[in-house]
């Protein structure tokens, strides 16, 4: 993690904190004789952790700034980069204090940026408030699951792979064996499939013949997998086959596969409920935000927002009004090779 990265993200995070602090009314000074309430927080519960030039930064302020960092920086800034972040945060506070002394908060550009940050902060808070009030019922979760059940379909399958020379899955030939050409690999796969259809033991043949040594050791068992987890050709054949069926030989980038489907099933609803709830909640949020935009009856200056006109492809060259064509090669280009 480069220091520059922390500094860049700190600028926005700290500015957001500053805008948030502007929203808070100043707390009245406590009366001298007023006793502290019984539930008052001990002074050392929020200690001053950075002091400089009369400035005091308490633990709560510092950790609040940490939490405004993007997620990808938080782990570093809360761990080994904490001291580095503290130095950057102090530098920002010192610069802000000096800028305030010089009246930069009254600069029109600064005011515009503060207004934008304030609006963004309020908008983010409103989105969180809306999201908190969005409810997702069991019926909505079930309806989404049923409507998208194919996405949760799984196949439990085994396979035997015969990989030709050059395949990413090709193994070093055993003693006495040779590397297979593509045609030889296909022929061998067809031969193995014929044995399986005739009643051969899939697990034994996978262990002795499959180029996929990992699954071969467990009889070619791949376990259960869903859509999008296998290469397209393999997935199509596996999901199309019935339980107990041995598919025709399937070619993929890895070679030739013989697939046996053990079962078809679905991921239980309870296992995917959190993901579905999140999806449905986000969909509801999007619909609410779209409705808000629609009800605003916004109008746009069409002339201002018109798409830019495409530039002419014939751009004049001031330095060379009549460019000369490129000279032809002396020797003819080589003939194209056939694929």
Image: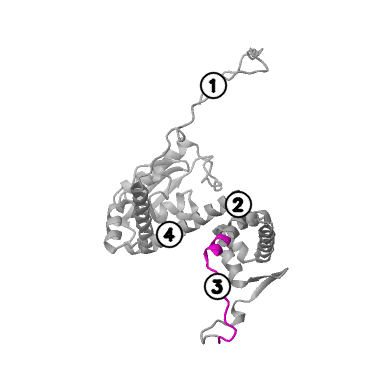
Q: CA distance from mark 3 to mark 4?
A: 25 Å
Is residue 256 part of the magenta span, yes or no?
Answer: no
Marks 1/4 in contact by CB < 8 Å: the verdict is no
User: Does dot 3 land on a helix, a strand or a loop?
Assistant: loop
Q: Earlier in the sequence, mark 2 or mark 1?
A: 2
Q: Quote the CA–CA distance across marks 2 and 1.
A: 41 Å
The mark that comes first in sequence, 1 or 4, is 4
- Magenta-colored span: 18-35
Separation of disc 1 and disc 4 at Cα?
A: 47 Å
Mark 4 residue crowding within 10 angstroms, few (<14) / some (14–19) / many (20+): few
Among the two numbered marks 1 and 3 on one chain, the one whose residue lies closer to the N terminus: 3
Q: Which residue is mark 1?
A: 313
* Residue at x-position 41% and y-position 56%: 221
Asked if disc 3 and disc 4 are in contact, CB closer than 8 Å, the reply is: no
Residue topped by disc 2: 110
User: Residues under labels 1 and 3: Cα distance?
Assistant: 64 Å
Q: CA distance from mark 2 to mark 4?
A: 24 Å
Is 32 left or right of 296, judged from the image as shown? right
| Dot placed on the residue nearer the N-terminal end, 2 or 4 | 2
SS assignment at label 4: helix
Comes first in the chain, label 2 or label 3: 3
Q: Nearer the viewer, residue 48 or 241?
A: 48
What label does residue 27 carry, if any?
A: 3
Q: Measuring from the top left, give residue 68's x and y in whole percent.
A: 55, 61
**32 part of magenta stretch:** yes
In the image, residue 278 sits, relative to residue 51, either above or below, namely above
Name the image quarter holding residue 333: top right
Q: Which mark is residue 126?
A: 4
Q: Quadrant of the N terminus?
A: bottom right
């Amino acid at each position: 993690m480069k220091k520059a990265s922390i500094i860049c993200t700190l600028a926005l995070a700290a500015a957001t904190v500053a805008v948030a602090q502007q929203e808070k009314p100043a707390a009245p000074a406590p009366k001298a004789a007023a006793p502290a309430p019984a539930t008052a927080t001990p002074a050392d519960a929020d200690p001053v952790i950075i002091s400089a030039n009369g400035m005091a930064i308490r633990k709560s302020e510092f950790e609040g700034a940490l939490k405004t960092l993007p997620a990808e920086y938080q782990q570093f800034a809360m761990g080994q980069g904490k001291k580095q972040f503290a130095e950057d945060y102090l530098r920002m506070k010192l610069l802000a204090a000096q800028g305030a002394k010089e009246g930069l908060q009254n600069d029109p550009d600064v005011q515009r940026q503060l207004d934008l940050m304030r609006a963004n902060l309020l908008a983010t808070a409103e989105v969180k408030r809306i999201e908190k009030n969005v409810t997702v019922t069991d019926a909505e979760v079930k309806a989404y699951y049923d409507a998208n059940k194919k996405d949760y379909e799984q196949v439990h399958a085994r396979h035997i792979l015969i990989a030709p020379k050059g395949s990413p899955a090709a193994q070093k030939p055993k003693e006495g064996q040779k590397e297979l050409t593509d045609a030889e690999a296909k022929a061998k796969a067809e031969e193995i499939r014929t044995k399986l259809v005739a009643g051969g033991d899939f697990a034994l043949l996978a262990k002795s013949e499959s180029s996929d040594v990992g699954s071969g050791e467990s009889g070619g068992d791949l376990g259960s997998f869903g859509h999008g987890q296998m290469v397209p050709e393999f997935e199509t054949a596996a999901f199309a086959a019935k339980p107990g069926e041995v598919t025709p030989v399937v070619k993929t980038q890895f070679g030739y596969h013989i697939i046996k489907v053990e079962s078809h099933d679905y991921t239980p609803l309870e296992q995917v409920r959190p993901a579905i709830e999140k999806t449905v909640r986000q969909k509801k949020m999007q619909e609410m935000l779209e409705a808000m935009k629609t009800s605003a009856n916004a109008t746009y200056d069409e002339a201002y927002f018109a798409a830019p006109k495409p530039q002419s492809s014939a751009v004049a060259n001031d330095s060379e009004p009549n460019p000369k064509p490129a000279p032809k090669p002396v020797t003819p280009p080589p003939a194209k090779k056939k694929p």
